[in-house]
Image (cartoon, rainbow, N blue to C red):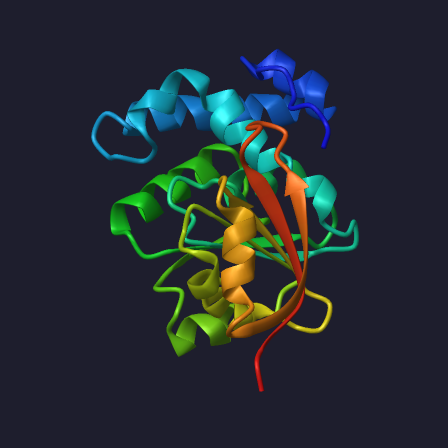
Amino acid sequence: MGAPLAIIDGPSTFANKFNVSRETVEKLDTYASLLKHWQKTINLVSPATLDTIWHRHMADSAQLLKLAPVTSHRWVDLGSGAGFPGLVLAILLRERPGVRVTLVESDTRKVAFLREVARQTGLASVVDICHARIEIASTHDRVGIVDVVTARALAPLPKLLGLCQPFFGPQTVGLLLKGREAERELEGAKANWQFEAACEASVTDAEARVLRITKLRAHD
């Protein structure tokens, strides 16, 4: 297991660690400013993390990009909430031709926030914000099969895999941000699901993990 990254304490540190352009960091900085403003009236993230947005939210989300195939064009982020990781990934992916990132969120106020961030960061051609519940058939039909499914702090893995499965095809990769119980959740999920999994160390939290799920299907 590699050592976690040093604390990502702001835009310049983020840019250096993830090798992104000044324009990308400016868009993420706009996002961070909007988050702090909207947080005053909507509970978007834990208040305790507002002073560590770049580490706890931006970097935590950005680490997923290197775990996805570079040919991935269709992404879906389930239960996007304040946009982590999906909206961060959309900003990082915005210059990749043909990329489309769908953010699925059922909370009306959070959807309004996501739309405002997308508007102010110029993501109209990249992001599709789907105001709907994840588990309903119309959402499955609208989104379809994708290349990458992402989620953070959404549900225990056995339930989360059920939410992910309708968007999985033979080549789909699931990138799921999990805490210290990741390996226990993996074992529990095997009762109902068949899949291949890699458990990657998080670069922002020594106790957290990123689960990379492929070949997902329900047991026969």
Residue at the (63%, 27%) spot, across then down: 24
- Residue at 39 percent across and 39 percent down: it is 82
Hey, which quadrant is residue 4 in on the image?
top right
Q: Position of residue 74 (x, y in %)?
A: 64, 59
10 left or right, relative to 116: right
Rendered location of residue 88, percent (x, y): 55, 37
For residue 36, side relative to residue 199 (left or right):
left
Res 115 → quadrant: top left
Which part of the image, by quadrant, shows the C terminus? bottom right
Q: How many marks?
A: 0
Residue furthest to the bottom in view is 220
* Quarter of the figure with the N terminus: top right
Q: Give how far across and how far down residue 87 sits, in percent.
A: 51, 41
Of the pair 172 and 206, the residue shown nearer to us: 206
Residue 124 in view (yes/no): no
Image vertical order of residue 185 relative to residue 123, above or below: below
The residue drawn where x is 48% and y is 58% is 157
Which of these two is toward me, 212 or 179? 179
- 158 and 122: which one is in front? 158
Is residue 210 positioned above or below 149 on the image?
above
Residue 14, position as x, y percentages in the image: 63, 19
